[in-house]
Image: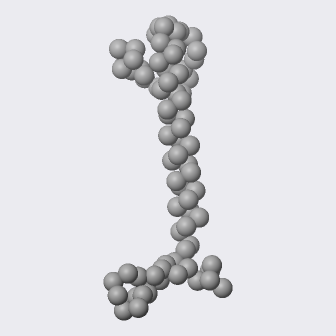
Amino acid sequence: MSQVLGVEISHPDNASLHDMIELGMTKYVSKLEEISVAATKEYQLENALEKMKFEWDSVCFECVPYRYALPFLCPIKEFLS
């Protein structure tokens, strides 16, 4: 956002809409909206990845040779029973 406005923006906890208007952000609403959409998607992807990591954390893979060749099989015992 600082690059779009050309001004360094601090992020205090008590920032208000009035502060943003004073910085002239209303001129850049469409560009800031693009940034917001991209940041929201990135945040959702990061959360989904963390959820997947947590769900797969308890899964244990055991690689076994397949017919004495290089390819290995990785059976998951939970799904085979």
In this rendering, position of residue 26 left or right of residue 7 = right
Q: How is the image coloured?
A: one colour
**Residue 21's x, y, as percent?**
53, 9
Indicate whether 58 appears above or below 19. Answer: below
Residue 70, located in which quarter of the rendered image?
A: bottom left
Indicate whether 77 appears above or below 21. Answer: below
Indicate whether 49 appears above or below 59. Answer: above
Q: Quadrant of the N terminus?
A: top left
Residue pushed farthest bottom? 68
Q: Residue at (48%, 8%) from the top-left corner?
A: 27
Count of numbered circles in the view: 0
**Residue 15's x, y, as percent?**
54, 20
Q: Quadrant of the C terminus?
A: bottom right
**Residue 53's x, y, as percent?**
52, 61
Q: Residue at (52%, 14%) from the top-left corner?
A: 29
Indicate whether 6 appears above or below 34. Answer: above
Residue 12 visible in the snapshot: no
Residue 48 visible in the snapshot: yes
The one nearer the camera, 12 or 5, is 5
Q: Residue at (53%, 68%) from the top-left corner?
A: 57
Q: Residue at (52%, 27%) from the top-left corner?
A: 36
The one nearer the camera, 6 or 59, is 59
Residue 16, located in which quarter of the rendered image?
A: top right
